[in-house]
Image (cartoon, helix red, strand yellow):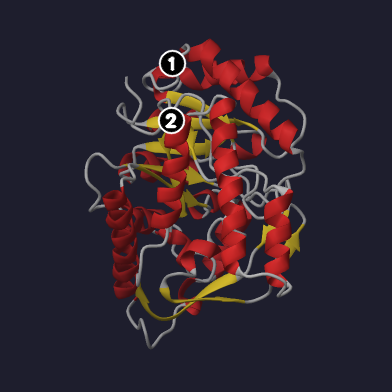
Amino acid sequence: MPLPYGVYRADHVGSFLRPKSVLDAREAVANDKSNTTELRKVEDTAVADVAKKQIDNGLRSITDGEFRRAYFHLDFLQHLSGIEIKGQTGLIRPHGFSPPVLAVTGKLGHPEPIQVEDFKFLEEQIKKQGGSATTKVCIPSPTMVHFRGGRASIDIEAYPDLDEFFEDLARVYQEELVSLYDAGCRFVQLDDTNLAYLCDPDMRKAAQDRNEDLATLPRKYAELINKAISKRPSDMKIGIHLCRGNYRSKWFASGGYEPVAEVLFKELNVDAYFLEYDDARSGDFKPLRHLPAHKVVVLGLMSSKKAELDDKEEIVRRLKEAAGIAPKGLEQLALSHQCGFSSTVEGNELSEEEQWAKVRLEVEIAKEIWGEDLSK
């Protein structure tokens, strides 16, 4: 079966380690020694470089490395009107990190496109390299505005009725996707921690303590995402990455996909799933039995959390094991690392060269399994 436009047999989640130039420029702005205009110039240079490095190392789905963000979600969501970032600057937990929290303080709005200028710049850099690479835009899933705070984080005067809140949240995403499509974007990846968190026993209990109905919440989130992407033209493809936490090589949640599998695969109207499967925390491959015949799973079998290279034979073995459960076998599968290399500005515990060596190994494995053309 053909892959959806923008998905490749060797793929990736989106973020890469920030170069020192970007880290230094961000620190200068934070210390009032520079400004955002100068920061943007540094970011432009770094984005052009990371686009070239992705292509040189064999990738064909190209992102800006999320170099313009400190967090994978907050830097996007704070541009929506009615949203404020509140709470502590970040809480370290035994296996991960809890970032600042979002609060809905007024009616949600989309005053201007958020990712369009970044998309246009990246698209220009990819075109300069030639070839057939695809520009991928990564944005946080709309569920990120609700899950961690629930009803308590949404202003009761602005939204006495949560149905209206979910309607407005879907609408602002529709508007952003339209703006991206009009700019030429044809592949968007939604980064979602919350469907994965609903697989974790402790996180499920915490949601229950916030009076969430675990029997209906996955379906409510699927309905939200479906509405958010419902107005995209048919030639704009959507992927979704389910993340279990990724801060300085630490994780946050565990548990197999079974609690959300049927909703995830049968009710969510996306084209591709990027699923974490790098260790036992993610459970077995049995949930893949629910995968519809026309959809694709990018299996995050490799780890972006550790510096050493993954065991090639083990990755191939696990790919074949998963293929034995997916309805159409290897045709429905692709390979990636479980998450990005730098979901926050700090990055995971490895060097840039170790990062690119891991990417090259992934491409090597994918070509051995599926052939030289990673788009087929």
Under circle 2, the secondary element is loop
Image point 51% across, 38% down: which residue?
A: 275
Front residue of 221 and 343: 343
Name the quarter where the C terminus is drawn.
top left
Image point 36% across, 81% down: which residue?
A: 159
Under circle 1, the secondary element is loop
Front residue of 43 and 95: 43
Front residue of 218 and 80: 80
Residue bearing mark 1: 373
Query: Label 1, label 2: how many angstroms apart (C-alpha)?
Result: 12 Å
Front residue of 3 and 94: 3
Image position of 226 (left or right of 118): left
- In terms of sequence position, does the residue under pointer 1 or pointer 2 come before the other? 2
Q: Is residue 104 above or below residue 348?
A: below
Image position of 22 (left or right of 215): right
Q: From the top left corner, tell me how far across and down residue 79 is, in percent.
A: 45, 69
Residue bearing mark 2: 133
Q: In the rendering, which numbered label is found on residue 282?
A: none
Answer yes or no: is residue 146 visible: no
Alpha-carbon neighbours of circle 2 within 10 Å: few (<14), some, or many (≥20)? many
